[in-house]
Structure formats: C-alpha cells, structure tokens
Amino acid sequence: QVKLVESGGGLVQPGGSLRLSCAASGTISRVNAIKWYRQAPGKERELVALTSMSEATNYADSVNGQITISGDNAKNMVYLQINSLQPEGTAVYYCYYLLQTHAIAPPRDSWGQGTHVTVSS
C-alpha cells in the first residue's frame, strides 16, 4: 500500500514563503508523474505543478514564477516551494502520484491527505 503524507503548511503572512513536503512510502516500482494541487475554500481543486518522466516540469499560469517543485529520490520526498504568498494562495495543498506498484501493474492514482496553507496578516 502506498501512502503520501504532506506537511509544511501553516499560517504565513502575505509576501512570505513556505516549503511543502510530500513523503511517499510503500511499494513503488515506478513513478510516472508527480503533481501538486490546491483547493481554495469554495473552489475547485486546481493543478499547480506537474513533473513527469515524459514531460518537462510545468506550472499553472496562476502560480508561474512563484512556485518550484523539486524532489529527493533517495528520501522519497517531493517538495513545493511557494514564494510571495498572497491571500489567494490560501488553500489545502495536495500531493499526487501516478505510480506503479510493480513493473507490470497498471498506473494508479495516489493522493495525500493535504496540508493547509493560510495566508493572512
């Protein structure tokens, strides 16, 4: 069983920065794509960052220049650095993997539980 656990959220003042973390555990043979989503109160879940084996890293236009996705394969960690946060960045941020648990298994979705980010003075 694969488990994703996000951390690093919290309260930050406008203009501040946060680094969100996503720790992956369990049986993972291959990671096909890693994404970060966010869902603001009363809004749809929004894709903000994507990295994959077959595509270059992409960011949503709404956050381009503000966020950076990175990872540490040795630690099975993925990070989302968010700079210049503004109140509209208040949301629950979710980590997502498209992965295979074995070489011949079909790709499957895996989601974390989310980490809350509140931007307020």
Image: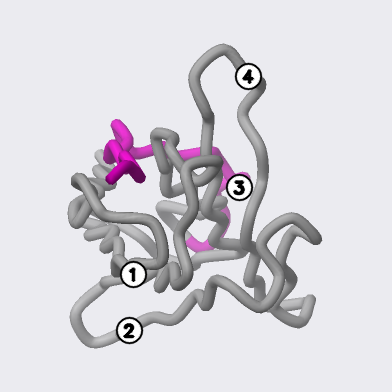
Given the image, on which type of amino acid does mark 2 rest? Asn
- Which mark sits nearer the N-terminus, 3 or 1? 1
Spatial separation of the CA atoms under disc 3 and disc 1? 33 Å
- Within 10 Å of disc 3 (Cα), the crowding (few <14, some 14-19, many 20+) is some
Give 104 or 57, whichever is nearer the viewer: 57
Q: Nearer the viewer, mark 1 or mark 2?
A: 1
Residue tagged by mark 2? 73
Spatial separation of the CA atoms under disc 4 and disc 2? 32 Å
Assess whether residue 105 is covered by the magenta stretch: yes
The residue located at (39%, 56%) in the rendering is 14
- Which mark sits nearer the N-terminus, 1 or 4? 1
- Within 10 Å of disc 4 (Cα), the crowding (few <14, some 14-19, many 20+) is few
The residue located at (52%, 53%) in the rendering is 36
Spatial separation of the CA atoms under disc 2 and disc 3? 19 Å
Residue tagged by mark 1? 17
Residue tagged by mark 4? 43
Q: Nearer the viewer, mark 4 or mark 3?
A: 4
Residue tagged by mark 3? 107
Disc 1 is placed on an element classified as: loop
Q: Which residues are magenta?
A: 103-121
Furthest-front residue in view?
121
Given the image, on which type of amino acid does mark 4 rest? Lys
- Which mark sits nearer the N-terminus, 2 or 3? 2
Compared with 80, 113 (above or below) is: above
The residue located at (60%, 62%) in the rendering is 33
Assess whether residue 113 is covered by the magenta stretch: yes
Give 58 or 25, whichever is nearer the viewer: 58
- Which mark sits nearer the N-terminus, 4 or 2? 4
For the residues labelled 4 and 2, say whether their Cβ atoms are less than 8 Å apart: no
